[in-house]
Image (cartoon, rainbow, N blue to C red):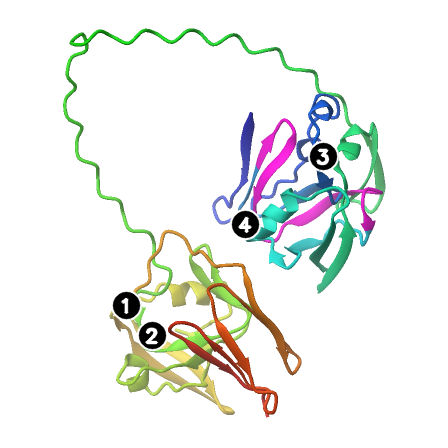
Amino acid sequence: MSAWIEVRPVRRRQLVMALAATALLGSAASAQERCDQTAGTLGIQGMRCEGCSFRMSESGLEEARFRTEPEIVAVARGFTRGGRLRPGDRIVAIDGALITTRAGSGRLVALRAGQAVTVRVRRDGEVTDLRMVAGSACELRARDEIQIDRLEESRVDVIRVPPVPRAAPLPPVPAAPRPPKPGAVPEMAPLPPMPAVPLPPPLAPSGYLGFGISCSECGMRDDVFFFTSPPTVEDVAEGGPARRAGLRSGDALLEIDGVEITSARGGRRFTAIEPGDSVRLTVRRGGATRVVTVVAEAGPMARARAAVIGDRLRYEGRLGATRIEVRGAPVRVTRDEATGEVVIRTSDTVIVLKRGG
């Protein structure tokens, strides 16, 4: 028997749930009899996150999905070797696979006792790689007393995990009824036609502005754009709305309709652009700031049921002090050692990264 535990946002507020030690570990008595002796643990006794789900069974955690980086709220002591997780750490990746991908969450759930693993965490505003050796989940379940570091208080608690009584056996399954004789069942009326399936929400503004953007630490969250720094305008289409309004490649996009693009409101406004909208963009070109007005047109609109981003690492390197990591579909990456220029080619895109001078 298994069940899903889901954590989702409610009325735009973050719903936070800390998983208890007994939920993550299973029972200390009955589950021990079925314990997989090879199962590993990082000592995590509780975590919280937004938009996450966990499938539990009698033997413990079977599957986890993370839409955001989970925050650790409780850690058992003495069950791992090497680096140690702390309350307040946010898990970023497991062995290079982002925790928000199926590969990353799968590696967390499928840990084996004695397995060496690299856990990337955000700690005190910095990203840190912890080289750890997983402990035995069975040993952790068998303990009557567990020392736990908690996030809420900077102290060590000793808790007793009470044994869970064995459930009563299920009643026998009744015999299946005999099928009716031919002709005994009246013909059913034809089913009504299936209603049309509505299209999923767009993954990009439906209003066409005629330019692309490049940025770092930006993307979409819950189908809404977010920017942590002003994006740079590029690939301004000839004859498009942006070109006619005077927008140029290299312009830094600061505001949309008087709202900072890096704010939550600015991201929502950028996402909600419709054909016919008159959009006032404030950009920085060189050392000057100017305002251009772009009238959105009807253009190509990307739609999909889910944004699936491959997590396979295709290229990793550095350009000066900047670390470059390319994941997803197959790409071809070349690097000019003399100039440091990096060229990334996909089936329909060429990205050129140049060292700033």
Report the amino acid beneath label 3: Ala
Was residue 72 drawn as part of the magenta stretch in this picture?
yes
**Residue at 85% in and 41% down:** 156
Alpha carbon separation for disc pair 1 and 3: 49 Å
Report the amino acid beneath label 4: Arg
* Magenta segment: 55-81
Alpha carbon separation for disc pair 4 and 3: 23 Å
Who comes first in sequence, dot 3 or dot 2?
Answer: 3
Alpha carbon separation for disc pair 1 and 4: 30 Å
Report the amino acid beneath label 2: Val
Rate crowding at label 2 as few (under 14), some (14 to 19) or many (20 or more) other CA atoms within 10 Å: some
Q: Which residue is mark 4?
A: 102
Q: Which residue is mark 2?
A: 279
Who comes first in sequence, dot 1 or dot 3?
Answer: 3
Mark drawn on residue 300? 1
Q: Element under label 1?
A: loop
Q: Position of residue 259 (x, y in %)?
A: 45, 71
Mark drawn on residue 137? none
Q: Element under label 4?
A: helix
